[in-house]
Image (cartoon, helix red, strand yellow):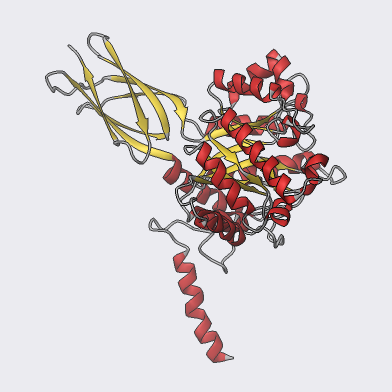
Amino acid sequence: MKTFVIFLLPCILLILARAQDNNGSFDPYATLFSPYTKQQWRSYQEKKINEGRKTELTFKVTYANGTQVEGAKLYIKQLSSDFHWGCGMTHRILNNTAYKKWFASKFTAADFHNELKWYWTERIQGQENYTDPDAMMKFADEHGIIVRGHTVLWDDVKYNQKWVKKLSPEKLLEAANKRVDSVVKRYKGRLIGWDVMNENLHHNFFEKRLGKNASSLFFNRVHKIDPDAILFMNEFNTTEHVNDELAPPEKYLRRMKKIQSFPGNSEIKMGIGLESHYGAEPIDLNYVRNSLDSLSQTGLPIWLTELDVKMDPKLQNSSGLQVIYLEEILRESFSHEAVKAMIIWTGASIDGCDVMCMTDENLVNTPIGDLIDALMEEWRTGEIEVVADFNGSCEVSVFNGGYEVTVVDPVTNGSSCVSFKADKVSSKKVDLKIMS
């Protein structure tokens, strides 16, 4: 027993030592043994947000002759963000002007709930109808909202039309190929990406009838039509539940590699779609982080595509807990640099949201809406004002995205305006000239 304790103690000390980052601050994810508080967890999230979502910029202001401009005023305005807040959208938005204004004022990304799905556009075989998605795409285009194509096909048998289920394998392949060609060619170049075969870890409708490579074949077909689009796997319970054996990160990645290794698929731009339907129990943030860490090793963009938190109405303080759990998963996800977007499922009660709503029927915020608005504000730079020092320099930390800076001469009040990009790739130094 003494030998075991002597051996174990250095191991524990080593792990605790590794729980300190280079600055000596606490890293709750590096240790299995030491307890950590919510405050420590939040501090680590903030650290990762600052590292992955923000850029330290240095502005240098000079006159045309190179003289440094002490006291120059800089007005910095964020025009866009590299991170997308999104929301589910339905056809109900089409005839509601107030709802359109609300949606466009908040979100830069969207998933259509049902309107792009096969059962919506071809309920009766041979009778296609794209009226709703066409109008919804038009609205999105007019307001600069990027849209994911959700979904080309769905591997769950219960979400395929009766006439589809009755087809022979030969006729099913013919009909599915026609469906792919129809929807992808129609919106080619207008979507950020496509969910090609929805939920193909939990379900296998097409694999059972067309063979084990069915998903890979359809990824190949979509890519050939729309080669610039990101093609997503889209799955639930990859981060939500540690006990779901069908879709943990390792199986998600295994299926993705199988699709990528299929002949002709090596050049596909892949994306990781995580539905993110959380339940009425405390969220295992450690499992979420470990899962996102594993998935992010691919270097591929991660999108949370249908994010919500479903609560048991019988649970005491269920509405309050829903807000708490939602904030936890939003903060944890945003602290991962690989997560490029989060799409809330869904927004206004006008859309008949049955899990959580951001607003009531009058577009007045619910507590969920208040939380999301607050985080949107917290995770943007907005507008800031700084003054150059005696060297004509100043430093600011901004969230990654597009910016416009107006520099004002302290003597003449003359001004000039420059647009620039803040991210890991772009220059961290912005030179500003005041023309005398």
Residue 373: x and y in percent read 61, 29
For the C terminus, the image quarter is top left
Q: Quadrant of residue 385?
A: top left
For the N terminus, the image quarter is bottom right
Query: Residue at the spot x=68%, y=49% of the render?
Result: 199
Residue 310: x and y in percent read 76, 43
**Front position in the image: 37 or 279:** 279
| Left or right of residue 104, residue 122 in this image | right
Q: Quadrant of residue 348?
A: top right
Regarding residue 320, the answer to whether it shows in the image is yes
Regarding residue 272, the answer to whether it shows in the image is no
| Left or right of residue 433, residue 4 in this image | right
Query: Residue at the spot x=62%, y=38% of the render?
Result: 180
Residue projecting furthest to the left: 65
Looking at the image, residue 137 lies above or below residue 3 = above
Residue 293: x and y in percent read 52, 56
| Left or right of residue 83, residue 90 in this image | right
Query: Residue at the spot x=44%, y=45% of the render?
Result: 52
Residue 105: x and y in percent read 59, 20
Residue projecting furthest to the front: 170
**Front position in the image: 73 or 241:** 241
Query: Residue at the spot x=62%, y=58% of the render?
Result: 287
Q: How many marks?
A: 0
Looking at the image, residue 202 lies above or below residue 232 = below
**Front position in the image: 252 or 200:** 200
Q: Quadrant of residue 322?
A: top right
| Left or right of residue 430, residue 189 in this image | right
Looking at the image, residue 217 lies above or below residue 15 = above
